[in-house]
Structure formats: C-alpha cells, structure tokens
Image: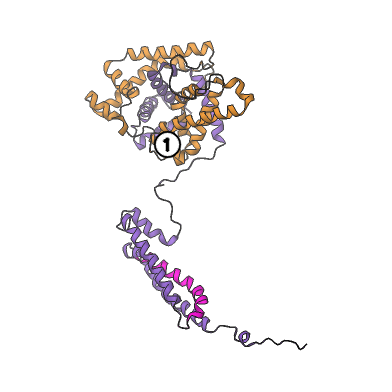
Amino acid sequence: MTALNPDPDAALVERVKRGDVRAFEMLVVKYQRRIERLIARMVRDVDLVADIAQETFIRAYRALPQFRAESAFYTWLYRIAVNTAKKALVDMKRDPIVTQTSLQGSEDEDETYRPGMEPTDGETPEALLASKEIAATVNAAIAALSEDLRQAITLREIEGLSYEEISEVMNCPIGTVRSRIFRAREAIAERLRPLLDTREGNRW
Amino acid sequence: MSLPDSDRSQYRRLLSALADGDATQGEAARAFDAWREDEDTRASWHCYQLIGDVMRSDDLAKPPARDESFLQALRERLADEPVVLAPVDTAEPAPVAVVEQPAVANARAGGWLGGRWQGPIAMAAGFLAVIGGLQVMRSPSGGTTAGPVALAGAPAASGSAVVAAVAPAAALAPVPQTQATAAQLAPYLAAHRQSTMNATFQMPGGDIRNASLVQPAP
C-alpha cells in the first residue's frame, strides 16, 4: 500500500537540485537522528558516529544531482550511510593507531537491530535525562490527544500512510486529515517546546 | 528575522504539510522562505520531526542542542561545497550535433519522429551518406584518381548526410529557415564538387613524371 506512495521529500529534493542549500538543511534536520542511530549500530564507536553522519550528508549532497528518485530519498540516503560506515570500518582496520580503540565490538558490521546492544552514545547523564524527558513528554501528549487526532498522526508517523490513504481509513476528506495531523503536532509541540529551548537561547 | 505571530501558525501549517509531502508547489515555496528567514519556523520543523521520530522509537529522543550543533557543523562543511545544480530534464543526453536539435526537440514534444521513427531515419540518413560517398568516388577519370577525389569529396558527402538528416525534421517542424538553408547549400555543394573534380584533372606533377634520372659519368 505504501510502496506506491510518492516520496514525501520530493519537493525538498527538487529544491536542493535547483541550488537551494537551505532546503538540504531541512532534510538533514529530518533524518539526522535516524542516520546517526543507524551508523551507531554499525560502527559502535561513539566518537565516530557524528563524523560519519556528517560525511554521509556531505556525500548525499554531492551526489544529489544523480539522484533519479527511483527510490525514496530516505532509502537512497540510508544506502549512502551504510556505505560510508562500511568504508570507515575498512579505513579503521587499515590504520592500527586509530583502530585500537575504535574497533572494540565493531566486528559485526550489520546494521540490524539487536536488543541490548544499543550504543551508549557517549551522552552525559544530563543529556540522557533530557532525552528521557522528551520521550515521556511526547508519549504523554499523544495519550492526551482526542481519538481522531491520535489516530491521524499515528497512521501518518508510525504506519507511514499518505493523506489519501488516511482519509480512506478514517472516512473523511483529505483536508480534514491534513488539519487533524497539524493540530495533533501542535498539541504535542506545545508541551514539548519548553524542553526544546536551548539554554543559550540560540535556536536554530 | 522573525515572522509576526499571526503568520506563524499559518507557516507551521505549511511545514506540517511539507513534512508529509502534501504541500502544493506554492505552499512549499512559502515554507522554504520561512525556513530561511524565521528561527521559529526552523525550531518548529525540528520539533515536528522530533515528534515523529519519538513516536517511532523512544531512543530517537535527543536534546535539541545536540541536533543544533550537528547542523551547525554541517553548515560549515556545506559552505565549502559547490552549489548543487542538477539539470531539470535529465532523461536524455544533450545532442552533440546542432543540426539534430530540431529532430530531438520534435521527439521530446511527442511528434511522430520521436521514439520508433528515430532509428529508421538515422539508418536511412547513414545509407544516403554512403550512397553519396560512392557517387563521388565514381570518378570519370578512372581508378587512379580515386584517392584525391575521395578526400575532396569527403566534406561534400558529410554535407549530403547533414541535409538528409535534417530533411525529415524540417518537413515536419515548421522551420522554413532550415529548408532555405538546405536549398541555398545545394549550389555551393555542386560548385564544390565541380571544383574538386577539376582539381583532379589538373594534377600537378607532369614535370615530375617527365623528369629522368641522369647518372653522372664515372
């Protein structure tokens, strides 16, 4: 069902292809966390995850003119991330000075999820606490949504359905779907925003 | 720069639609502009994406400062990169020969020359070029002059091929200038052939052929 959905990032990708680097930043903000988690499961060296993620996005930016939209942008980006991480692993094995600390536990280059093997991410206790607080706030906000709003945003974010498909499932016009998803996001964001203000006051 | 509060809700609505790939072209353009100019828009985009990530998995919940520093570092690297500019239509490679452009343009516009007729026409043009070459090589002076005539005839043969290749496209496309050019070329090509044939008959070198080697007396 979702295989036939158009790529939700098509407008952003086209914008980047026409020379708008800021549109690429929007894609970075959208996928950075998922890409970092993927790389962390492959490399398992917390110091290298951010560097490899950066390299992934730079490679994607350079290769974007060749992106033919035969797959979704995220699928394409995912492949670049896997290849970049594998190359980093090969480079680490070639360089023993770097690999002495980096190779611990990196023998498995499989990116598949294994319970209990999540990277520690090298986060401070404060950062870990903040992460837990964010997750708890989002979950509590979702639980507090009306049934219509919760169903709409769940079908979109978790099931990945298009607006058209959600309108069929919920038996309502597409405009209503669009409005419900926006209202759900705003209701969650209202609770989340106090946690997202950086201490320096420098937001994005 | 910041947008007025009254506009923010409207822009957030656009961002929400853009995040799901449901924004129209105009809405997307407005959302891009807002992202560029308004920090609240950028924070809202991050917030919406974070909500989606956390809904999919709690371990994607990260403090915003971390995401922000990642973007800042990437911005610095992107600033050193050449700006991406992809061609709008990359379905077909650009034609090398200028004379083929009308035919290619016609094919792209969906004319009957496009697709299945392009191959046969190209083959016919090649065949005509070979015939033209053979005609020129059939010199009235016999086989001894074949070399120079073939060399002189080469441009004329290519000229014939060009005309042959252009003719079908010109017949279809309303470009009278192309037909006029082909017609204007004809007398020049004829004159060129004539001059090269004359040049063949006036081969210098009679003196050389008549020269004899005189050996010095011992």
- The answer to whether residue A75 is left or right of residue A173 is right
What is the quadrant of the N terminus of chain A in the image?
top left
**Magenta includes B149?**
yes
Q: Which chain does the residue under circle 1 lie in? A: A
Locate residue B126, reporting x and y percent. Answer: 40, 65
Locate residue B60, reporting x and y percent. Answer: 44, 19
Q: Nearer the viewer, residue A65 or B42?
A: A65
Given the current orientation, which residue lies at the most extreme left position?
A: A171
Locate residue A159, reporting x and y percent. Answer: 32, 23
Q: In this rendering, does residue B15 appear at all? A: yes
Which chain comes out purple in the rendered image? Answer: B
Identify the residue at image location x=32%, y=65%. B171
Q: Is residue B64 above or below residue B185?
A: above
Look at the numbered disc 1 and give the secondary structure of its residue: helix
Q: Nearer the viewer, residue A126 or B47?
A: A126
**Magenta includes B3?**
no
Identify the residue at image location x=48%, y=35%. A60
Q: What range is drawn magenta here? A: B140-167
The amino acid on which the numbered mark 1 sits, given as a three-letter code, is Val
Q: Main secondary structure of the magenta part?
A: helix
Q: Which residue is mark 1?
A: A13
- The answer to whether residue A150 is left or right of residue B184 is left
Chain A as rendered: colour: orange
Q: Is residue A108 above or below residue B134?
A: above
Locate residue B194, reporting x and y percent. Answer: 47, 80
Q: Is residue B191 above or below residue B30?
A: below
